Image (tube, helix red, strand yellow):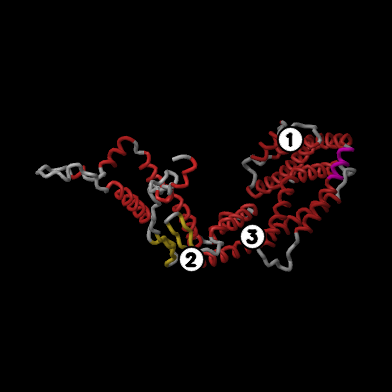
Amino acid sequence: LSEDDSFLVDTTMDTTPSFAQVQFKAGGTPEMESIHHELHITNQLMYLQPPLELSRCHLITQLHKWISTVTGLQRIQSTRYQVGLEETDPSDQTYRSLLGKLMHDNSQPLVDAYGAIEGLLEGVDLYVKEWLQYQSLWDMEFSNITSKLGEDLNMWQKLLLDIKKSRRTIDTTETMRKFGPVEIHYGKVQSKVNFKYDSWHKEIVGRFGSLLGQNMQDFYNTISKARTELENHSVDASSTSEAVHFITLLQSLKRQLKEWDNQIEVYGTGQKMLERSRYQFPTSWLDVDNVEGEWGAFNEILKRKDSNMQSQIGTLQMKIVAEDKVIEQKTIELLQDWERKKPVQGEIRPDSATSTLTIYEGTFTRLKEERENVIKAKEALELAEPGLVTPGDDRLAVAVEE
């Protein structure tokens, strides 16, 4: 036909389909039967019914069915139209032998199939364990919690945060979670766990609030007392003993600054946590703003007193050196007196010996405290190395032991 006569050809009668028109879906999508599991609570014991092992058995069984769908197909037999008495091997009539060949040549597809089942069940198992761990809500005793945490406010705060975090699993309107064909239904235990959580949370918040309130009150009293004591002492003290007391007090407070500053932070976060938990604050509650205000006043006077001490460091060093000499002389005289009057003679009455020992014990104790204060003052003013022990300290320690 010429190009002009092409209209005479009826293309609608062409029954040969083109490659683009023929599209068949290879294989098929397996329709997996759903497996139903449900969480229950009976006699305060939480469990999964039926056990998760049933899903493993069910999935493997369905995998085998899909494998048998292919391997159970009948082979085309070339001898089926031949008349004779020849017998054929039954294993040659289907494709079941392909499974053994697959295991021998390349078993990875089959391994991947079993691995997919195990991977799915591992995810299901982890999720079920998240629910089963709520069994502890019925098992634990509040006395065990208080004895373990004690009065550590940081640990109590961490416990409340953990409660809030772990509750996300049950704080949902859904009652079922699907993992492929595996369904975990938890509607029957959700309300019971929520109620138990609310009960525990209320009790723990109440205990934490009580501890925090008492701790804040004690801290406020300590800081207020320290501030008052600083205000009543001056670096211009006339007596050397007062100067020693002022220096040791100042150094002792400075060493606690970091710990106290951390406590202030804990009080702030703790009160905010109680507010978010709708804690009913008692009328006697000391607000954290008052504590922070007292803390600021204390820091201000501490910095001022420390600045005054640094400006008169030379005068203070002279006073401490003089006091150190006085204490050293008192130590020598007391030790000499102790050697003379030590009740070791046989003719001394027991009651007299006891009275003498009591008097000397009190004297030695007071002298030891004075020496320790002088040592602290010398270390603060860089007149002695920290931890340095003098011969006088050794002799005094021996006498106290006697």
* Residue 308 on the magenta span: yes
Q: Quadrant of the N terminus?
A: top left
Residue 258 is drawn in which quadrant?
Answer: top right
Label placed on residue 187: 2
Residue 21 position (above or below residue 208): above
Nearest the eye: 358 or 382: 382
Q: Upstream in the sequence, badge 3 or badge 2?
A: 2
In space, the residues marked 3 and 2 are separated at their CA atoms by: 32 Å
In space, the residues marked 3 and 1 are separated at their CA atoms by: 57 Å
Residue 232 position within the rendered picture, expressed as x and y whole percent measured from the top left: 86, 51
Nearest the eye: 234 or 170: 170
Q: Upstream in the sequence, badge 3 or badge 1?
A: 3
The residue at which mark 3 appears reads as 208
The residue at which mark 1 appears reads as 336
Type of the residue with mark 1 = Gln
Residue numbers of the magenta segment: 303-311
For image coordinates 48% across by 54% down, the residue present is: 127
Residue 143 falls left or right of residue 43: right
Residue 252 position within the rendered picture, expressed as x and y whole percent measured from the top left: 76, 44
Give the class, few, some or many, for how many residues have Cα within 10 Å of label 3's Cα (few <14, many ≥20): many
Give the class, few, some or many, for how many residues have Cα within 10 Å of label 1's Cα (few <14, many ≥20): few
